[in-house]
Amino acid sequence: MSNEVIYSPGLDGVAAAETRISLLDTKLGEIVIKGYDLIQLSESKEYLDIVHLLLEDALPSPADKVKLAKQLQDEYQIPSEINDIFKLLPHETHPMDGLRTGISALAGFDREIDDSSAEANKRKAYKLLGHMPNIVANSYHILQKKEPIAPLEELSYSANFYYMLTGKVPTSLEERIFDQSLVLYSEHEMPNSTFTARVIASTKSDLYGALTGAVSSLKGNLHGGANEAVMYMLLDAKTPAEFEALLQSKLEKKEKIMGFGHRVYMKKMDPRALLMKKALKELCDEQGNDTLYQMCEAGEKVMEREKGIFPNLDYYAAPVYWMLGIPIPLYTPIFFSSRTVGLCAHVIEQHENNKLFRPRVHYVGERHLLNQ
């Protein structure tokens, strides 16, 4: 076996793990989740179906789904001390930092924290999934000097999440589209945050530690923060013509435009973005105002014409969340919340068949000899 170190910037093209969880099949244009096409799943299944699939290796029966919904409902409430911690944070704290703090603090309340068996990690995963809407929503409300919103157990998981974010019970259309967005964000092979979680887990660190690191990774606007940046661009422009002009100006200045391009989807549109584009059209039609849809289509054409790149999921998820009445700073925390199940599945898999990550470097510095 050769000892030669192969250098690939950003680990581009390097398979860093063997997994049964997911695959981005660029040849067939499929996102494979436990053997199923994610796009097909998102058109016929709900988020809880994906949770069961990722953690139990099978789609749930009706009875399984009822049991899972009850299991997560039992974990809706978080320790009151977590809200006390949120109250100590500065008002300007970004919700992703509040989320990171909340997940890290939860570790102290879990008596199984150092048990990395698959069974214990699954119990932690379900507990985290139950807690996540509460942490995401109420860390934000408390930072805004508002009262926390208590969960409504009579609502579905996604409807309750939406309610805790907005204080409004969703319509059937709003619930379906919000749930679909959670499905689309649930798992996506080996992006930076998942790799971060697996690297941390490879040291035999606990699930909470791995997810805390993943939050930090996802906060960066080259990964999860793009959805916020997209919405701010759309709001700056206000009309399709102004949005085209804004993008052209950014291109002339060689500025990075968020929401376009993907390390994996180089020559076609992210298939998840296509579904969110349809969802945006539905919301615009229901509300009788298609300005955002027209703006997004105009921007899509500019970027394809000028750069040959296409929208990713964040590009259309951002205006969908805006039409749903969700505050912009919560877009990336929602992304993380939905991705929690995928991250937990990866940590469980890493712990079950572990090898410590320890890559080498491509050294480009100098070497000196000391004078003898």
Image (cartoon, rainbow, N blue to C red):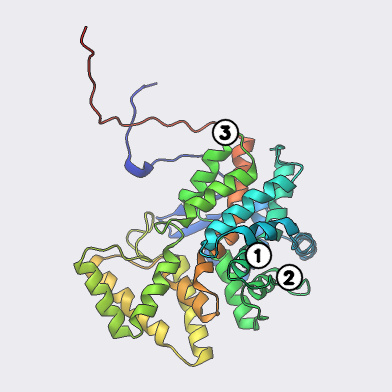
Q: Earlier in the sequence, mark 1 or mark 2?
A: 1
> Residue 355 in the image: x percent, y percent?
55, 31
Q: Earlier in the sequence, mark 3 or mark 2?
A: 2
Q: Earlier in the sequence, mark 3 or mark 1?
A: 1
Q: Residues within 10 Å of mark 2 (few under 14, many from 20)?
A: some
Whether the residues at callouts 1 and 2 have beta carbons within 8 Å, the answer is yes
Residue annotated with mark 3: 203
Q: Quadrant of residue 354?
A: top right
Mark 3 → mark 1, Cα distance in angstroms: 28 Å
Residue annotated with mark 1: 133
Q: Residues within 10 Å of mark 3 (few under 14, many from 20)?
A: some
Decide which of 277, 169 is in the foreground and name it: 169
**Visible in this render: residue 38?**
no
**Image-based side of 269 in relation to 56, left or right:** left
Whether the residues at callouts 3 and 1 have beta carbons within 8 Å, the answer is no
Decide which of 139, 24 is in the foreground and name it: 139
Quadrant holding the N terminus = top left
Look at label 1 and name its amino acid: Pro
**Image-based side of 218 in relation to 125, left or right:** left
Q: Residues within 10 Å of mark 1 (few under 14, many from 20)?
A: many
Quadrant holding the C terminus = top left
Mark 3 → mark 2, Cα distance in angstroms: 36 Å
Considering only vertical position in the picture, is 175 above or below 57? below
**Visible in this render: residue 164?**
yes
Please tell me the numbered disc located at residue 151: 2
Considering only vertical position in the picture, is 231 above or below 48? below
> Residue 334 in the image: x percent, y percent?
56, 65
